[in-house]
Image: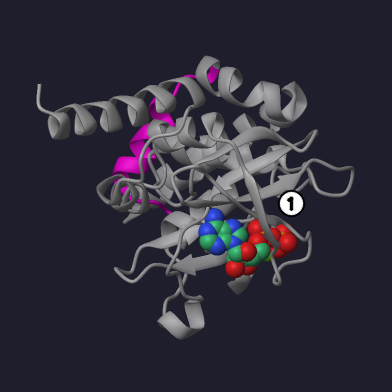
Amino acid sequence: MSKTKFFFFFYFFSVYVTGAVFGFSPVNSSLLQCLRLHFSNPKTEHLLESSSLKFIEIMPTGTSMPLKVQLEHGTFAIFKPLSSSFDSRHEVAAYRVDRLLELGLVPATVMKEFQGVKGSLQFFIEGTRDPYTAGATISQNMKFLDLLIANTDRSAENFLVLKDGRQLAIDHDLAFRTLDGTPGEWIISKSIPDLKVFKRLKEVPDALWHLELDPLLGPTKVTKFLQRRDYLIRRMETLLTEK
Ligand SMILES: Nc1ncnc2c1ncn2[C@@H]1O[C@H](COP(=O)(O)OP(=O)(O)O)[C@@H](O)[C@H]1O
Ligand SMILES: [Mg+2]
């Protein structure tokens, strides 16, 4: 083997070996592009779970002062500590609901420890605009998500729009409320999701919801969630057959 060949062989070998040992891999722009396009999938979850984190800043917007952190591949994430006033486990639960129903609205979110504190870690999506600047109105799928997870905090700050028009739902620590009362006919009629999503809602078994949500919400909130699901299915089915 020539000296040059040996040098390149040694260089790439050491980059990949250190990657395997320390969990780092060389920055790969197609990987970054892929993560930005498919922000909610098991690979992105794995990246969040396995990456070490570097503090960047306290977000200047928002009320809970979330932290922006950098992941190993050069992408970013939002870390929200778990506290008595902000239950960041709800962030992860909202993402799991989104993932199970294949809504594609909530960026991948996992539980993670950062500097000794437990919290939620959500993949940060760059290049978003607020709905006013983007001239977007909230989609029926997002309204549906809010009804299903009993989220009362969908302000314009918690609804972001990508260049291609896709909508993102963030900030769900105030979801999974256990308030009494049910949504009215009018709001339900304006929140019917795509039929594909509605079909998934009817298909996902209770056992899977419990498996995914119980560790984050506890059985009482999950039971309430399933009651809301049943109520929405009943009311939406009636509205769909009347159409
Ligand atoms: N996943 C994300 N991708 C891009 N921007 C985000 C993301 N999460 C939060 N942000 C930005 O950070 C701000 C504060 O985050 P948010 O979750 O709304 O926290 P708070 O609970 O303090 O309102 C948001 O208004 C948004 O501008
Ligand atoms: Mg917010």
Q: Position of residue 189 (x, y in %)?
A: 46, 59
Mark 1 close to ligand 1, CB under 8 Å: no
Side of 55 where 136 appears, left or right: left
The residue drawn where x is 47% and y is 35% is 47
Task: Tell me, yes or no, whether the highlighted magenta stretch contains residue 13.
Answer: no
Residue 56 vertical placement versus 204 (above, below): below
Task: Tell me, yes or no, whether the highlighted magenta stretch contains residue 201.
Answer: yes
The residue drawn where x is 71% and y is 71% is 60
Can you tell which quarter of the image residue 221 is in? top right
Q: Position of residue 194 (x, y in %)?
A: 33, 50
Q: Which of the pair 21/88 is nearer the observer?
A: 21
Neighbourhood count class around disc 1 (C-alpha, 10 Å): few under 14, some 14–19, many 20 upward: some
Q: How many marks?
A: 1
> Label 1 amino acid?
Leu
Can you tell which quarter of the image residue 16 is in? top left
Q: Position of residue 129 (x, y in %)?
A: 47, 75
Q: Which of the pair 238/162 is nearer the observer?
A: 162
The quadrant the C terminus occupies is bottom left
The quadrant the N terminus occupies is top left
Regarding residue 133, the answer to whether it shows in the image is yes
The residue drawn where x is 69% and y is 28% is 216
Q: Quadrant of ligand 2?
A: bottom right
Regarding residue 153, the answer to whether it shows in the image is no
Looking at the magenta stretch, what is its main secondary structure? helix
Residue 151 vertical placement versus 93 (above, below): below
Q: Secondary structure at mark 1?
A: loop
**In the rendered structure, which segment of residues is drawn in magenta?**
192-206
Q: Position of residue 136 (x, y in %)?
A: 42, 77
Residue bearing mark 1: 174
